[in-house]
Amino acid sequence: MAAVYCKNGVSKFWRRNCQHEVNGEEKIAIKSMLLTSFREPVPQIAVQIAEVIAKIARFDCPREWPELVPTLLRAVQNTTDLEQHRALLVLHSVMKTMWSKRLPLDRKIFEQLTNTMYSFVLNLWDGFTTLYFQSLNEMQATNVSQTYIEKALLALRILRKSTTHGFYKPHWSEDCMLFIKSSFPRLKESLECRHQLKQTNYDQLTTLTEKFILKLMKILNEFLELHPLSFIDFIPAALEFSFNYVFNEGTNMIFENNELKFTNFAIHCINLMKGILSSNTYNTYTEDSLPKEVNVSDAIAAKKDFFTPVRLSYICEKIVMHYFLLTQPELEQWDDDPEAFCLDESGESWKYALKPCTEAFFLALFSQFREDMTTEMAKYIKTTQGQVLNDQSDLKSILAKDAIYNAAGLVSFNLYDEIDFDEWFTNQLVHEVKIKGNRFRIIRRRAIWLIGQWTGVKFDRQLRPQVYAACLNLIEQSEDMCVRITASKTLMTTMDDFEFDSQSFLEYLEPSFASLFTLLREAKECHTKMNVLYIMGMMIDKMSTLMTNEYADKLIQYLPLLWEESRDYNLLRCAIISILIQIVKASNHIPQHLSTFIYPVIQISTNTNEPSHVYLLEEGLELWLTLIENSIALNPELLDLSPNILSIIEQSSENLRTCLYIIQTYVLLDPPVFLERHGKAIVACCMYLLSDMRPEGVVMVLKLFELFLKTMPEYGIELLRPSLPDIFMKIVKNSEYPMVMTLHLTFMSRVLIVSQNTFFQIVQELQAPQAFQQLLDVWISKMSSVTHSEKRKLLGKIKYFFLFLDNKIIAFNPKKGLALASLLTVQNDLIYDRISSIMMNLCEVLNDIMREDEGTMYDSLIVTGEADLESNYWWNIDDADNEYNTHHYERLKKLCLSDPVHTIVLKSYIESQINLMKQQLGPERVINLLRAVDDTVLDNLAEHISIPLKSEQ
């Protein structure tokens, strides 16, 4: 325990300038004591001491502890076995810790450390390995041999990190290349030694020898992966060595009674061959991109010389007819735990599992030698096509066909031109999946899997209904569990295809869903349940266009029971919620049978007081949003859910976007009820968030505030009154990002539309000199940076004109208009001084929104009916997903049809304002004012308005 506490203390208090740092004198004393602790007899304590020394070395070596490595090397030379072993153990821990540091300077230090000690450690390893083999030949005491192999193994572990990470270019080091070269004969000796030890009862020595072999194989694989150019000279030896022990005469070293006993060694050998085949350095290179001291053409030549057509045929036969065969342990696992047997190996499972490793090597052979391998594989397929089996056939023949089917499925894309799969399916496979019997389940499972592999490669659409029927037949409750799971995956693969025809699957929808639900209930493992639920969800999504109320009701009846049964599996409940989302989207309404179930689900998922909300919240919010979007009215159950949204926002901003979308959908669903009940709390919460929020969040909140003003203008102003000074001050300061400033100006325009009195009150409350003048300057200057046509038109829209007389603002009520155009009739020098900028901005807006139709110019933002809405996309007020038609979508359109932005023609309003301006000031004064406007701007305006401004000058 003292060593463990010391190790943990080093991690916390050894670093410089940390709190409670160990002082310098104590550090020196501790390090001196540790350098004399190489005689610890207890192995567990020795390991902990080595870890302590390594952790200190991470901070202090080599600058503040230069004597560490020389002391360790001297201790390794000691003749005392115990001290020598402990010194090697410490050296290994130190090297492993130093290697883990990733900064360039640290990597340089590790390389220097490697150069200092590599030759010494290499000689140690070679010497200890030789002594180990000699001790076995001379039949010395077991403990003596064990001491030698343990030291050799420790030295080998040191060499592993040094060889793979201690050299920038290993082929520049003679010692490094000598070590790799000597690895192959040492492996051969070790395998022969292991084979002899297996005949005795020296289990401990056998285990250590196997560790020694596997460690050497790991070094070779890592060296190939990290330094492929330095490995070129060893490619012939590596291929011959691996081939011999995995496929050829050397298999007797790792097989017993035709059963593989040294699986990990075989995996390393196969991966070594695969690594040579798949290395990008050997396959894609240019002469200019490679150093002159290596020749990649040697690697290509070595592969070509080794993988001859004869050898490829031999390897193909061994892989398919031996390594692909189901073994007795696999068949026993099938019987004992079919769900674990069906678990798909994914990721990097080929690095540590034999079957995925062999399959990856098989695919690598096809990628490099497609023509030869395709010819060989076609022979096996044609052989099995002529072979008729049934449940009474011998197991050997069934397993052989299963292996061939497995190979044919793996390389289906490579056999596209060689195999007529439609004929194969019609004449053989579709019949084999119907043959019953326990023994023949092996072929039923593999045949339906094979069909799934080929449907996305080459398969007639007319045959797909037969696949649906075959899958449905194999998912039935009476079928073997493993076959059922495989058939469900094939069904998913067949549906998840661009050629999928939902109409042809309609008759199989309800029975497939029922069978999948039965499979779901009978499955014991969570991963199986999750996969089946995913298939059910995808099925609903694919069939959504044809999902009638009748079908939806049939599917819904299974979910409440499933929800109750999965109370202990929150991830499973997430999948159930995802299916609910698909059902609601497909139905485009809230089914009656579902309403009593869906509201409690959302309540549990979004209630922050429920422990399960941690897992269910994200899916629960999405279901909640989908539910509101597809609701016709705000019912009491839906309203009772609304308090949860504030607690979610207050708890975390992780789901803020979805929460704000939900609030938006509530507001559009029933503005009076929702805003009167929660409006003040929502505004207060959002204002608190605005004080520390990124620009994206500010934009979302301002969009929500703008929606309040659109749906309930008068009450919205009352709700938002406390937030207006802060928002207006942001405009005055003019320090926001353009995107955020656009939303601030848009919101200000909405306030002007609703209540000019409130606007003036807020301006007067601002703690800034000449606040209105600054607002006006920012307004004019930022118009050009607004890119959205709707917002550019909106930025000036108000109900009233403002006359500035004796520095007082007087309002009167003319027609509705656009702000900048309305400013033309404001009789004040502030406006006249800015007439050029105002006219230029109006011209830009007109150019953006005016379109031509058969020689007539029109305002493209004017909406007269739903036809205009359907042909435009700019009316959408938020970023929510509207890819499918919902009631929320219809409410958005209705809101758009009543928006003043889409009901007032800008061109006509500008014309009326200029005419009114002439009446107020007289033609001569107007001409004098317009002389400040650029001629190009006036010419552009004349293209849109009928008043001949330029000619009057």
Image (cartoon, rainbow, N blue to C red):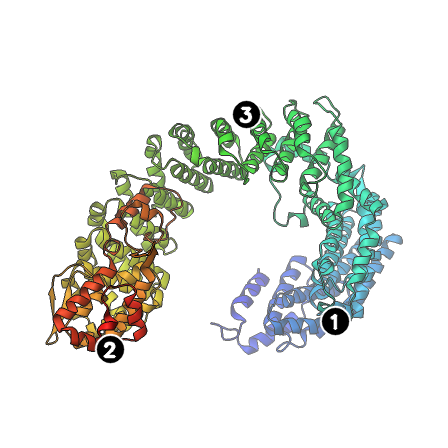
* Identity of the residue furthest to the right in this view: 138
Whether 143 is drawn above or below 445: the answer is below
Q: Is residue 312 left or right of residue 627?
A: right
**Residue depicted at x 76% and y 52%:** 273
Q: Amino acid at mark 2?
A: Arg
Dot 3 or dot 2: first in sequence order is 3
Q: How many marks?
A: 3
* Residue at disc 3, secondary structure: loop
Q: Amino acid at mark 3?
A: Gln
Q: CA distance from mark 3 to mark 2?
A: 88 Å
Q: Amino acid at mark 1?
A: Met
**For the C terminus, which image quadrant?**
bottom left
**Residue depicted at x 49% and y 33%:** 502
**What residue is disc 2 on?**
931
Judge by depth and name the residue closer to the eye, 222 or 821: 821
Of circles 1 and 2, the one toward us is: 2
**Disc number at residue 477?**
3
Q: Are marks 3 and 2 in contact (CB under 8 Å)?
A: no
Q: CA distance from mark 1 to mark 2?
A: 87 Å
**For the N terminus, which image quadrant?**
bottom right
Q: Based on the displayed image, in which of its 4 quarters is residue 585 positioned?
A: top left
**Disc number at residue 573?**
none
Q: State whether residue 694 appears in this view.
A: no
Dot 1 or dot 2: first in sequence order is 1
Dot 1 or dot 3: first in sequence order is 1
Residue 277's spot in the image, x, y percent? 74, 53
**What residue is disc 1 on?**
117
* Residue at disc 1, secondary structure: helix
Q: Based on the displayed image, in which of its 4 quarters is residue 718 positioned?
A: bottom left
Judge by depth and name the residue closer to the eye, 853 or 49: 853
Q: How busy is the neighbourhood of tag 1: few (under 14 within 10 Å), some, or many (20 plus)?
A: some
